[in-house]
Amino acid sequence: MKVYIVRHGEVSHNALKVYSNENEDLNENGIIQAKELKRTIEDLDYDIIISSPLIRAKHTSMIINAKNKNILIDNRLEERNPGDLNGKPISYTNREEYWNYYTKIKYGTSENIQDFFRRVYDFLDELKTKNYKSVLIVAHSGVSKAFSGYFEGIKEGKFLNRGLKNCEIKIYEL
């Protein structure tokens, strides 16, 4: 099964470079990014779209859905909850440590990285049991980091630079 993962279009918290898991919609630039992605993937063949429940991912899914495929929502694709970091600048933390699989530092997050990856891995393990030929996933940077760990391995545990940019797409074989 081909798995295409896309990160949602830009939201204001992305542009401001702050931690957020608020249910925020795309900003004007995010809508433009999603429309550009729609043109890029219009010939892509996929059976279904599976989206994070957050509005930025759902809105991106609706914009890029040129083939009018069903869009399923799966809570396991929600971004890692930043907990007490919500609204704080990303420079507030050591980003290398925040996205280090082996870190002992929690940074006030309500979900450590191992639990977060386990949630996403559970989604992927279940997806394996489905009879799709190809699936388009719309989620978040953190989820794309977890996909990287699942498909490419944990390796040294450093995931800071393994996530997708807004409306970037990556292909995996499941």
Image: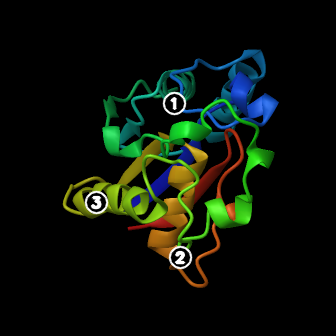
Locate the N terminus and report the quarter of the image it occupies: bottom left
Dot 3 and dot 1 residues touching (CB under 8 Å): no
- The residue wearing badge 1 is 57
Q: Which residue lies furthest to the bottom in this view?
A: 155
User: Distance of mark 3 from mark 2, alpha carbons?
Assistant: 19 Å
17 is higher (above) or lower (below) than 101: above
**Quadrant position of residue 70:** top left
Please tell me how crowded label 2 is: few (under 14), some (14-19), or many (20+) other residues with Cα within 10 Å: some
**Quadrant position of residue 75:** top left
- Is residue 40 toward the left or the right of residue 141 in the image? right
Looking at the image, tell me whether mark 3 or mark 1 is earlier in sequence order.
Answer: 1
Please tell me how crowded label 1 is: few (under 14), some (14-19), or many (20+) other residues with Cα within 10 Å: many
162 is higher (above) or lower (below) than 73: below
**Quadrant position of residue 115:** bottom left
Q: Position of residue 126 (x, y in %)?
A: 23, 58
Dot 2 amino acid type: Tyr
Q: Which mark is residue 102?
A: 2
Q: Which of marks 2 and 1 is in front?
A: 2
- The residue wearing badge 3 is 122
Locate the C terminus and report the quarter of the image it occupies: bottom left
Looking at the image, tell me whether mark 3 or mark 2 is earlier in sequence order.
Answer: 2
Dot 1 amino acid type: Ala
Dot 3 amino acid type: Asp
User: Distance of mark 3 from mark 1, alpha carbons?
Assistant: 20 Å
Assign a secondary structure to mark 2.
Answer: loop
Q: Where is residue 64 in the image (x, y as percent from the top left)?
A: 56, 28
Please tell me how crowded label 3 is: few (under 14), some (14-19), or many (20+) other residues with Cα within 10 Å: few
In this rendered view, identify the residue nearer to me: 57 or 38: 57
